[in-house]
Image: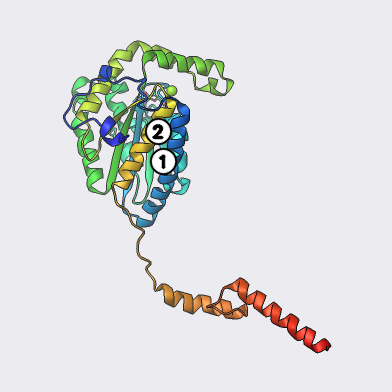
Amino acid sequence: MNGTDQFRIKTGSKVDLGKIDPNFHGDYENEDAAVTELAKNSQRLTELQALMTAENKHSLLIVLQAMDGGGKDGTIKHVMSAMNPQGCSVVGFKVPTAEELAHDYLWRIHKVTPGKGRITVFNRSHFEDVLVVRVHNLVPVDVWSKRYNEINAFERGLANSGTTIVKFFLHIDKEEQLRRFKDRLDEPGKQWKISDSDYTEREYWDDYQQAYVDAISKCSFNYAPWYVIPANHKWIRNLMVSQILVETMEGWKMKYPEPSVDLTEIRQKYHAEVVEELGLAASEPVVEEVQAKEKKGKKKGKKKKK
Ligand code: AMP
Ligand code: MG
């Protein structure tokens, strides 16, 4: 399955979320089949990230958006765990603080975008400023309606500076959301996640879906595409997100940089000395050398006895 083609929202097309089935699971009958594929993708992601660190050229910004309970946290746990934490950051965006509100809405975003060789995952993002902000009229319409162009310009600038941006909308339906809230109620380890607003926001479901339609349709470009991922089944969601990340990073055609030093010279200069110090020949395999020496010693010993 080619995730990049299948789930990408084409530039200029209006997404119809009603026509994208959140229950879709493609040719994968059940979780088992998908889990094997996910493991392969995870291994590939680990390799690709190592290359990315070595090249120190690309930056990757992964934006995760979803309705409450849509699986942003789960995606981070199951997909991003393939990454070396040293080269990866996750940033969650909550209700803005007083300091953040005293600035423009991109201020808190821009300063945490990934540097060269690094991956940053946004758990919510600047898109909240055309989602929750729009649905609850937190700013007037003539302010939020300009933000689509502002966001596009901002993302274009990041892309021009070597940042690849991939944006995932994890698409669940209203019934699945309620099932997940119920799971949270029943599982002691998840109860802390429950908030009143999770339930009261359900009344605005259609407004949010409309806000998502506009954000996705107006802000999907080749340099920063939106992917709508069917997410009622967590296993297909994880598999597809990992698949798209693999395809994206493979598209960079990365190579390990050539060594900056003369390896032969380094071997001779530093390692030959060490081998000599240990009394071992540089050119011969260490084990054989030691074994040969021991054998010689034994023979000599035998001769002496005679
Ligand atoms: P959670 O992701 O469950 O921890 O919730 C974070 C909350 O912060 C959500 O209810 C978001 O809608 C809210 N939030 C994030 N960004 C903004 C923003 N720019 N303005 C207002 N609310 C926001
Ligand atoms: Mg929440």
Q: Position of residue 7 (x, y in %)?
A: 28, 30
Q: Which residue lies most toward the right here?
A: 305
Residue that appears at 27% across and 23% down = 212
Residue that appears at 41% across and 16% down = 176
The quarter of the picture where the N terminus appears is: top left
Label drawn at residue 93? none
Q: Amino acid at mark 1?
A: Asn
Work out whether residue 252 or residue 54 is closer to the camera in this orientation and state it: 252
Which one is earlier in the sequence, the residue at label 2 or at label 1?
1
Q: Position of residue 227 (x, y in %)?
A: 29, 31
Whether ligand 1 has any atom under 8 Å from the Cβ at mark 1 is answered as: no
Q: Amino acid at mark 2?
A: Leu
Residue 114, compared with residue 175, is above or below; it is below
Looking at the rendered structure, the secondary structure element under dot 1 is: helix
**Image mark count:** 2
Task: Work out how far the residue at label 2 is from the one at label 1, CA to CA, in angstroms.
Answer: 8 Å
Looking at the rendered structure, the secondary structure element under dot 2 is: helix
Give the quadrant of residue 290.
Answer: bottom right
Work out whether residue 85 or residue 40 is closer to the camera in this orientation and state it: 40
Q: Which residue is mark 2?
A: 239
Q: Where ligand 2 lies, by image quadrant? A: top left
Give the quadrant of residue 145.
Answer: top left
Residue 137 in sight from this viewpoint: no
Residue that appears at 21% across and 38% down = 222
The answer to whether the residues at label 2 and label 1 have Cβ atoms under 8 Å apart is yes
Q: Position of residue 251 (x, y in %)?
A: 28, 46
The quarter of the picture where the C terminus appears is: bottom right
Crowd around label 2: few <14 · some 14–19 · many ≥20 (10 Å) = many
Q: Which residue is mark 1?
A: 41
Q: Which residue lies most toward the front here?
A: 306
Work out whether residue 52 or residue 199 is closer to the camera in this orientation and state it: 52
